[in-house]
Image (cartoon, grey):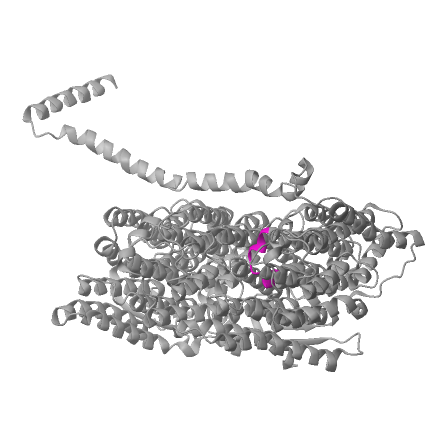
Amino acid sequence: MTLLAIIAVLFLGGILAWLSEHWKDGASRWVALLSLLLAIALLGRYADHTGIATATGSAPLWWDSLQLNWIPRFGITFFLALDGLGFLLLALTLAMGLFGLIATWRDVGFRRGFFYFNYLWTLAGVAGVFTAMDLFLFFFFWEVMLVPMLLLIAVWGYEQRIPAAIKFFIFTQASSLLMLIAIVALVYLHYSASGQLTFNYRELLAARLPPATSYWLMLGFFVAFAVKLPALPLHTWLPDAHTQAPTAGSILLAAILLKTGAYGLLRFTLPLFPESSLAFAPVAMSIGAASVVYGAVMSFAQRDMKRLVAYSSVSHMGFVLLGLYALNAIAIQGAVMQMIAHGLSTAALFALVGALQHRLHTRDMGELGGLWGNLPRLSAIALFFAVASLGLPGLGNFIAEFLVLAGSFASSRWITAVAATGLVGAALYALLMMQRVFFGGERSPHQNSGPPADLAPRESAALLSLAVLLVFLGLRPQGVFDTAGPAVADALQHIDATVAGTPDRYGAPPGDTGAVADAADSRWPPSNPERGISP
Amino acid sequence: MTVVAWIPMLPLLGFLVLIATPLFSDRPLPPKLVAAIGVGSVGLAAILTAFLAATQFAGNPAAELNLSLWQWFSVDGLQLDFGFHLDWLTLVMLSVVTGVGFLIHLYSTGYMRDDAGYQRYFAYLNLFVCAMLLLVLADNLVLLYLGWEGVGLCSYLLIGFWYRDPANGAAARKAFVVTRIGDTAMVIGLFLLFTEFATLDIGELISALSTVQANDPRVTLAALLLLGGAVGKSAQLPLQTWLPDAMAGPTPVSALIHAATMVTAGVYLIARMHPLFALSDMAMSAVAIVGALTLLLAGCSALVQSDIKRVLAYSTISQIGYMFLALGVGAWSGAIFHLMTHAFFKALLFLAAGSVILGLHHEQDIFRMGGLRRKIPFTFFCFLIGCACLAALPFTSGFYSKDRILLSAWDFYHGFNGIWLAGVLGALVTGFYSFRLLFLVFFGREGEASSHCRDANNTAMVLPLGMLAVLALLGGLLAPPLQSVFGAAGAGHPPLWVEAIAVAAPLAGIAMAWWACLYNDPARGEQSALGRFWYSGWGFDRLYDTLLVKPFTTLARLNRNDVIDRLYSGTAAASRQLHGLVSVSQNGQVRWYIATLAVGTVLFLALLVVL
């Protein structure tokens, strides 16, 4: 029930925030803050599950689950479950939600109640995405997180907000349509083969599909997730959406929403379609490496500081795609770490750009320069996150990129070598940003208003806590690996079974199907208290 | 045991205190306190190193220490500890980093006294020492890489320390990006090693290598990739271009990072991984050839420079070339010995040059100096000692280490060979450029800048200069017992004339310098075409600029608006056009509708008939 409570707190908190603004000015952000803190406290109840793998050697895969009937006629249930991967991403979601709230505490100028309603509903949708284990429910949450995000861009965004919002909407909507078709087809094919109509993820894992169909369905899922990631060549909505979104929206988008794509690939695409994923892996890895390099080059060329950070996201998320499709534990663990580390570092960079825009009313790096003199605190913190972004060892981003590359090197040397040049590219754009904005001679675009104020204690504290977290992830990352370990191993198990050829999910003689179903089912005992699944 | 952990920890704490206080308070710390923290932390680390050497290592050439602080990460067979390994090689590096580092920190309190960024300066410098210590202490290649990139970052920050001048920023970025190209090769080398040997722990790797056949292509490739990293960090061919520009930083930084410690990290890496290199003839030759070519190229460039710091920068590149040459002929301990003596005398030279520059109010052009030996005699003596060591005059420290390298080169190839010849020619060039520098700055006519020369040395600067001068002179007696790390070196006996040439070459160079600078008029004059070519560092900057930098930036700028987005905006535009076209038909005129309906029906019927 805790899972449901977390999501419900965010949904209800959103409604309450909207209402509260009518009662008292500025009440909505306090409501938002309280509901986030409450959700975090609820999530904290799972904290003692983290890192169990080291203590006992083998940890239960699922920490908690909740299954309620929803639309029994179509085999649709309200099925939430949490494992280590879900926990990490849920923690990231709530933490970054809190960070975005605090970092932009005074930024929202109008319609505050509605703003925080959308803010919390986006978070609620994402929390649902990370926990839903019924494909219909998953799709439901997938759409829920989209609309409030769209409104955040379209209502509170900058000068070109409407075209950016439309672009964001069309890209995500068109691609999720493909996923919906794939989901329905998967369910239907499973139904016609087994006579059982279900949207339940664990039951669909045993679905037996003809290879050609499986490949197309896999692509349906892949495209939807690749758009969110975003991967080349489906990335072009991101720079516009990021640049035009308000700071809090950019933080949500970069730190959390992009991760839903990576999560979807790991949770759904790989285990549901192991054969096709295996066949598709070289293509996906190439797309990942191309995103790494192309994103870095594009980032280098930008004049708008926010666009620079946005394109750097394309580059960093390319590492995630590369790592996921390297299909080994080292690379996938690296990809999980990259989701978290990129979430922290990019959220901080967007908050910094927002802070600059708030003070100087420009993001054009041609107009900025020499800010270190007036804003030493902001500049020093920006330096830290720029350096994190270029993957300096000792910080979480390095661990992530190192593991991704080390793991994918075993799968494909040349693709990895190409992706590794992204390390040079990252140095190019991150240091160029530092030079053009913070170093050089002092230039102030708005001299009449006097020197801008340095970071307030509230902003410094929020940013510094992310910095401390990144250092911690860089020096003691094992907790993350232990927590995500069982989920990663489980996703890989499907792939490994395919590589080994047993159980062969199609072309097997009819007599063997029982054994196949058992093999798949044994990881999901229907009423095994250890795994906490209670259908 | 935990003494070891405190050695890098102390500078780290110093860094944290110095960087954190401005985040919470608007008032900077008093300069005295900054100096006490910055210098004290490194001084304490030096004392701990000395204590460690005295208690654990003295008289015990086979001493080793291992310390694992915590498990860093362990993912599916890739297991690494945050762990340290100490042997005599580590100890030599520790002593150089903390000892020379301490002296340079002390000197900095005088040199940077009036700088507005005093606290920031010491914060960066402390972070550098911490990263450098991690680099040499690391027991695995990933932790080594952590230190490796960490020193690169500090180098970037300190080259661009005076950030208001965009030229400094450009030099800093060039340093970071060029070394990162090498680092990327190195990290690919790590992946290769891990894929092949399933470990990145240095000790385990070396024992895994014992079962590998010589000249295995995997080993050669891995060694060459590591060499790529070493070449970048140590400013060797073809990635040497960043070091001369790196002189934009404050002079003590050039002494510490770009002469004594960081730039020699590549030498340390190859020495640390020597069993890997020794397995591959091709990698060994590559190291030797890189060293030989670099030492000649950089030496020639040093001959014609006009900026006092650029002469020393090219000289550093050239001297590290000697170390690479030594590594390439298997003279591991010779290379480390030269690393150590070079750290003493090159730090001395840079600090003395710093005193000159400060005394002349930030004048760096040697053609505007001259005749300074009477005005700043102490600095002159320090510089003289430094130049004598650099030129490897007999009985100075540089002589012992360089002599060993030349003899090893002769032995390794069993007689006369090109590598040895390059070393001897290099010795001649070294004698030439080092004494050209000395003569131009301290002898001869007084230059335009010499008249307002003052003695800028204060106590904080005199003490390090004096200590380093003593170390530079007597460092030759400190040959560390490295045979437990590298194995006993075979003692060759080359013919006497070979030794004689090695001694004579620098003397000939000095004579040439005397002839060129004191006997003849050293007026700047216009340089010959060859001189200009050497002055520009053999045109490498221009080559890379045309081949790599310009095409890259042009392409990137051209594609600023993302050609892939055109695909989508094109689709959007096309559908809008189509929309316009079709919406013309919906014009609300009944006549038009009836007409199109009729035409459509006729066409449809015609189609039916035809088919």
Q: Quadrant of residue A465?
A: bottom left
* Quadrant of the image containing the N terminus of chain B: bottom right
In the rendered image, residue B168, in percent from the top left (x then y), is placed at 51, 54
In the rendered image, residue B530, in percent from the top left (x then y), is placed at 69, 38
Q: Is residue B265 visible?
A: no
**Above-or-below relation of A150 to B92:** above
Q: Which region is colored magenta?
A: B245-254
Find out whether residue A341 is within the magenta segment.
no
* Quadrant of the image containing the C terminus of chain B: top left
Q: Which residue is drawn at 54% across and 50% down?
A: A421
> What count of labels does the image hold?
0
Q: Is residue A525 visible?
A: yes
Seen from the viewer's position, the closer of residues A33 and A323 is A33
Find out whether residue B248 is within the magenta segment.
yes
Q: In which quarter of the image is residue B491?
A: bottom right
Q: In which quarter of the image is residue A369?
A: bottom left
Q: Main secondary structure of the magenta part?
A: helix
- Left or right: residue B496 versus residue A18 is right
Seen from the viewer's position, the closer of residues A515 and B207 is B207
Q: Which residue lies furthest to the right in this view?
A: B495
- Left or right: residue A334 versus residue A144 is right
In the rendered image, residue A175, in percent from the top left (x then y), is placed at 33, 48
In the rendered image, residue B269, in percent from the top left (x then y), is placed at 68, 61
